[in-house]
Image (cartoon, grey):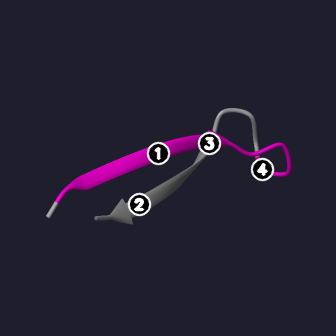
Amino acid sequence: MTFKVYYQPSKKSNPKRENTHVMYF
């Protein structure tokens, strides 16, 4: 199983805080 984490900046949230998207393959 491969573990990957994607970070995408959210415009609605604070610019200092980023949303974390975790996907399992």
Distance between mark 3 and mark 4 Cα atoms: 11 Å
Distance between mark 2 and mark 3 Cα atoms: 11 Å
Question: Up-down: is 25 above or below 14?
Answer: below
Kindly identify the amino acid type of the residue bearing the numbered disc 1. Tyr
Identify which residue, 9 or 14, lies in the foreground.
9
Question: Up-down: is 1 above or below 20?
Answer: below
Distance between mark 4 and mark 1 Cα atoms: 16 Å
Which is nearer the N-term, disc 4 or disc 1? 1
Distance between mark 2 and mark 1 Cα atoms: 6 Å
Decide if residue 21 is on the left or right side of residue 16.
left
How crowded is the residue under tag 3: few (<14 C-alpha within 10 Å), some, or many (20+)?
few
The region drawn magenta spans 2-13
The structure residue drawn at horizontal position 23% and vertical position 55%, both measured from the top left corner, is: 3
Q: Label 2: which residue?
A: 22
Label of residue 13 in the image: 4
- Give yes or no for residue 9 being in the magenta stretch: yes
Decide if residue 13 is on the left or right side of residue 2.
right
The structure residue drawn at horizontal position 41% and vertical position 60%, both measured from the top left corner, is: 22
Which is nearer the N-term, disc 3 or disc 4? 3
Distance between mark 3 and mark 1 Cα atoms: 6 Å
User: For the view shown, which residue lies furthest in the left direction?
Assistant: 1
Kindly identify the amino acid type of the residue bearing the numbered disc 3. Gln
Q: Label 1: which residue?
A: 6
Which is nearer the N-term, disc 2 or disc 3? 3
Which is nearer the N-term, disc 2 or disc 4? 4
Regarding mark 2 in the picture, which secondary structure is present there?
strand
Which is nearer the N-term, disc 2 or disc 1? 1
Kindly identify the amino acid type of the residue bearing the numbered disc 4. Ser
The answer to the question of whether label 2 and label 1 lie on touching residues, with beta carbons closer than 8 A, is yes
The answer to the question of whether label 3 and label 1 lie on touching residues, with beta carbons closer than 8 A, is yes
Regarding mark 3 in the picture, which secondary structure is present there?
strand
